Amino acid sequence: LTFATSASAPSWVAAAGGGKVLNVIGITNSTRTTLTTSAAADFISTTYTQIQADSKIGVVAVMSGFSNSSGGANLNLTYDTTEYLGVGAWQYVTAANQKIASFCAYFDGASTTGSKTFKLSYGVENVDTARPFVVWNPNSSDDARLAQTKTTIIITEYDM
């Protein structure tokens, strides 16, 4: 809201130097899955249609897991052809209860628009096999206190 000296009333104008949200999508997955121990494996692999070249991309994901496994694995994100290692984490504790893993990333989008590969995965660097937890999206078959849990991912594209 501005007030020009020659005007008799305030007026609305576009903010200078600010950005705007170009697109927001949400992805959910509630399929209970036993994870394999491997050097790398995907949680979710899909595509995202980038609206603007050289935009900024923000990703937030919250995942539910159950039971301990190896205690050391990277949570990774791949966008287009770039892999971002270690952008997620979970708390390793010895009790075989529900675990929460989270991803959070903000990065430069591709230099072109259109369909881009989008993948959340786990992997290890110096050993042959690992996994962050035994079950992804656990339910009452894992613990009678649980409903069917879900993984939620939000991808936001910004013009900055």
Image (cartoon, grey):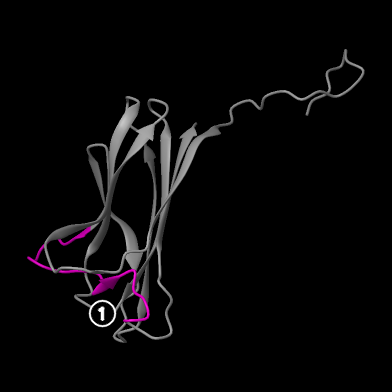
Is residue 133 visible to us here? no
| Residue located 37% across and 41% down the image | 107
Q: Position of residue 139 (x, y in %)?
A: 36, 76
Left or right? Give the position of 141 relative to 17: left
Three-letter residue code for mark 1: Asn
Residue at the limit of the structure toward the top, as seen here: 6
In this rendered view, identify the residue nearer to me: 110 or 125: 110
Where 145 sits versus 129, above or below? Answer: below
> Can you tell which quarter of the image residue 48 is in?
top left
Tell how many labels.
Answer: 1
Where 11 sits versus 61, above or below? Answer: above
| Residue located 42% across and 26% down the image | 52
**Segment colored magenta:** 122-141
Circle 1 — which element?
loop
In this rendered view, identify the residue nearer to me: 109 or 147: 147
Residue at the limit of the structure toward the right, as seen here: 8
In this rendered view, identify the residue nearer to me: 93 or 37: 37
Q: Quadrant of the N terminus?
A: top right
| Residue located 88% across and 12% down the image | 6
Q: Does 139 lie within the magenta span?
A: yes
Q: Position of residue 67 (x, y in %)?
A: 28, 80
The residue indicated by pointer 1 is 68
Q: Position of residue 18 (x, y in %)?
A: 59, 31
Where 34 sits versus 20, above or below? Answer: below
Q: Position of residue 128 (x, y in %)?
A: 7, 65
Left or right? Give the position of 156 relative to 108: right
Q: Main secondary structure of the magenta part?
A: loop
> Can you tell which quarter of the image residue 122 is in?
bottom left
Crowding at dot 1, Cα within 10 Å, few <14 / some 14-19 / many 20+, comes out as: some
> Can you tell which quarter of the image residue 129 is in?
bottom left
Left or right? Give the position of 133 relative to 5: left
